[in-house]
């Protein structure tokens, strides 16, 4: 951690959170991070209880947002923030003492735009059976890391806005949270930040805990239905034709890099073949039944595992998948909230375009549509041209060990190390360099 700690803006959207907000705010001011460097902004989203009265017991800035919805509240909070680093916490979340130190250490790394730590179900809310189920489900789906970036899906890198952080320049570049999304707005934001060219990264030593504030199993399954039902909004948005904004500077960037290298090394002509191309249109038409099929697959797996083990956990998992599947089947009845084309802003070329040098000093650019997601011990890549997650298998979209990539220097200019040839062979094998 740098000796000079930066100011952090912490935005907390709150709606009738009087039961959990004291625990949330106490954890912030009891953390190891200097209190004077914490700008805590609580956005009251039309609460009718004593949320704001409890919050005012702390040195927080309380503001009002009358438009109902977490996205509106968070965006309003950002508009009142002063820091270059934005932390988002839900009002039912509390953090460990070193949370901010661990998160900011990763967020300050070059070209990192968004960071996710562990999010653990809390056991202080009296919902023992639900929390046991939640703990087991999250642990299994995230490969025991409790970090959503490890979620084994093929649709998108995911950052959970219940507890996360973004570089403000990346957040503002893509336009913040999408108020038209009732749910899944956090997945949407992390996808846009990733598409723009910033790294998404995990800080798995940073831990936050979330308090379940429902009324039991009925409310839990109701949430699962709502999750499936509203997913159609996210699916429809990302099925629209995409228009990438900000590629006009790329040719100048390539020319400047080529000019800088001429005095030292012979520059490969292949650089000219790696200029960004216009994104192709998806040929496959959108069908919501694709996502319904995923739900059916999960449902069948839960039933099979129960019949094999008679573990009651799998019955609960089965019911949960039934609720999600029902929501996804009914989702297409919702009115369309987005209309194309989907405009996506790209970061500056020096952030987006990844350059490597092989042993003879010749520079090569990786495929311009390649995006990186950095985990603690793994790394995976997304090709945003058609949104293909690249990795060793469809089920585990991880590429190579992150430690190996650090040693090989993938994210910095090479210094003539003999391992450069190995890097080139890996990239060439994965067809990440154009022929």
Image (cartoon, helix red, strand yellow):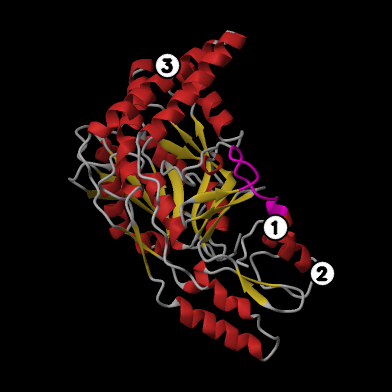
Question: In the picture shown, does residue 337 fall above or below 257?
Answer: above
Q: Nearer the viewer, mark 3 or mark 1?
A: 1
Residue 9, visible in the rendered structure: no
- Residue drawn 76% across and 78% down? 360
Q: Which residue is denoted by mark 3 in the rendering? A: 319
Label 3: which secondary element: helix
Q: Which residue is denoted by mark 2 in the rendering? A: 418
Residue 241 appears left or right of 338: right
Q: Earlier in the sequence, mark 3 or mark 1?
A: 3
Residue 232 position within the rendered picture, expressed as x and y whole percent measured from the top left: 31, 37
Q: Are marks 2 and 3 in contact (CB under 8 Å)?
A: no
Residue 42 position within the rendered picture, expressed as x and y whole percent measured from the top left: 31, 47
- The span picked out in magenta is 391-403
Q: Nearer the viewer, mark 1 or mark 2?
A: 1
Q: Earlier in the sequence, mark 1 or mark 2?
A: 2
Q: How many marks?
A: 3
Residue 398 is a magenta residue:
yes
Q: Nearer the viewer, residue 416 or 367?
A: 367
Residue 283 position within the rendered picture, expressed as x and y whole percent measured from the top left: 40, 50
Residue 67 appears left or right of 257: left
**Quadrant of the rendered structure where residue 295 is?**
top left
**Quadrant of the rendered structure where residue 224 is?**
top left
- Residue drawn 59% across and 37% down? 395
**What residue occupies the far bottom of the structure in this picture?**
263
Residues packed near mark 2 inside 10 Å, few (<14), some (14 to 19) or many (20 plus): few
Label 1: which secondary element: helix
Q: Which residue is denoted by mark 1 in the rendering? A: 429
- Residue drawn 44% across and 19% down? 127
Residue 230 appears left or right of 250: left
Query: What mark, if any, has residue 163 been given in the picture?
Result: none
């Amino acid at each position: 951690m740098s000796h000079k700690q930066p100011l952090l803006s912490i935005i907390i959207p709150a709606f009738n959170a009087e039961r959990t907000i004291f625990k949330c705010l106490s954890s912030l001011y009891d953390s190891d991070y200097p209190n004077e460097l914490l700008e805590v902004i609580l956005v009251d989203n039309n609460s009718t209880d004593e949320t704001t009265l409890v919050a005012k017991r702390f040195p927080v800035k309380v503001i009002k947002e009358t438009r109902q919805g977490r996205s509106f509240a968070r965006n309003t909070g950002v508009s009142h923030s002063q820091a270059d680093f934005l932390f988002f916490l839900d009002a039912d979340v509390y953090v460990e003492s070193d949370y901010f130190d661990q998160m900011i250490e990763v967020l300050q790394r070059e070209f990192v735009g968004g960071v996710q730590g562990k999010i653990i179900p809390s056991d202080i809310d009296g919902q023992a059976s639900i929390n046991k189920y939640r703990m087991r489900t999250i642990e299994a789906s995230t490969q025991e890391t409790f970090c959503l970036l490890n979620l084994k899906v093929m649709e998108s890198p995911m950052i959970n806005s219940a507890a996360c952080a973004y570089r403000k320049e990346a957040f503002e570049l893509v336009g913040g949270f999408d108020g038209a999304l009732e749910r899944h707005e956090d997945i949407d934001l992390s996808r846009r930040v990733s598409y723009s060219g910033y790294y998404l990264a995990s800080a798995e030593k940073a831990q936050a805990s979330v308090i379940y504030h429902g009324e039991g199993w009925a409310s839990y399954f109701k949430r699962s239905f709502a999750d499936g039902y509203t997913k159609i909004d996210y699916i429809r948005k990302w099925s629209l034709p995409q228009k990438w904004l900000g590629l006009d500077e790329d040719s100048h960037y390539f020319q400047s890099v080529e000019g800088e290298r001429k005095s030292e090394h012979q520059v490969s002509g292949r650089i000219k073949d790696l200029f960004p191309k216009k994104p192709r249109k998806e040929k496959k038409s959108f069908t919501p039944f694709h996502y319904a099929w995923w739900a059916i697959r999960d449902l069948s797996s839960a039933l099979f595992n129960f019949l094999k083990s008679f573990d009651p956990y799998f019955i609960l998992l089965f019911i949960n998948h039934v609720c999600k599947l029902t929501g996804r089947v009914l989702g297409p009845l919702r009115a369309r909230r987005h209309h194309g084309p989907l405009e996506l802003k790209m970061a500056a070329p020096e952030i987006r375009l990844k350059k490597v040098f092989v042993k003879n000093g010749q520079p090569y650019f990786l495929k311009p549509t390649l995006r990186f997601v950095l985990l603690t011990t793994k790394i995976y890549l997304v090709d945003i041209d058609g949104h293909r997650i690249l990795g060793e298998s469809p089920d585990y979209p991880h590429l190579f060990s992150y430690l190996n990539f650090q040693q090989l220097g993938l994210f910095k200019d090479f210094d003539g190390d003999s391992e450069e040839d190995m890097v080139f062979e890996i990239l060439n094998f994965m067809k990440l360099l154009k022929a």
